[in-house]
Image (cartoon, rainbow, N blue to C red):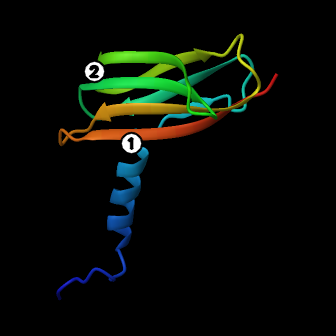
Amino acid sequence: MKSSQNSIASLEELQSIEDELDFNLIQAYPNPFNPSTTLRFKLETNSQISIKVYDSLGRLVSELLRGEKQAGVHSVVFDAKGLASGAYFIRMQYTNAKGAVQLQTKAITLVK
């Protein structure tokens, strides 16, 4: 049977897609936070990575990480002392196992 673009995905295909999507997502705990939050992420392979924090106007607030990281689970702390309450955005850029550059963004909220 030939598959079409509009076919229904099998459970195995859906799990594979879900695993791929969840693999590198940044998790922030706690969120909302005051005054700091821990960001956790998982890399499939050794990768060049950068993690930056932006305010709601798109201004760079902090560069938390830049360089090469080994495959595995990592964490970094974002300390927001001196920043105003509000929404901030974590932007993670990394190279995936296929060598393509990936970007992921996560919203976090500072409550004072």
Q: Nearer the viewer, residue 53 or 27?
A: 53
Determine the image quadrant of residue 16.
bottom left
Indicate the amino acid at tag 1.
Answer: Phe
Q: Which residue is mark 2?
A: 70
Residue 29 visible: yes
Q: Is residue 83 left or right of residue 63?
A: right
Q: Indicate the position of residue 48 as horizontal and vertical percent values.
A: 27, 24
Q: Indicate the position of residue 15 as horizontal and vertical percent values.
A: 38, 60
Q: Nearer the viewer, residue 102 or 16?
A: 102
Of the 4 image quadrants, the one containing the N terminus is bottom left
Q: Which residue is mark 1?
A: 23
Badge 2 crowding class, 10 Å Cα cut-off, few under 14, some 14 to 19, many 20 or more, is: few
Q: Report the number of numbered marks.
A: 2
The residue located at (66%, 16%) in the rendering is 80
Q: Is residue 10 left or right of residue 90?
A: left
Residue, far top: 82
Determine the image quadrant of residue 65.
top left
Q: Nearer the viewer, residue 58 or 32?
A: 58
Q: Is residue 72 left or right of residue 51?
A: left
- Say which label, 2 or 1, has the lower sequence index: 1
Mark carried by residue 100: none
The residue located at (33%, 25%) in the rendering is 49
Give the spatial CA distance, label 2 vs label 1: 15 Å
Of the 4 image quadrants, the one containing the C terminus is top right
The residue located at (56%, 33%) in the rendering is 58
Task: Describe the element under mark 1 as helix, strand or loop.
Answer: loop
Q: Indicate the position of residue 55 as horizontal and vertical percent values.
A: 62, 29
Q: Is residue 58 left or right of residue 46?
A: right
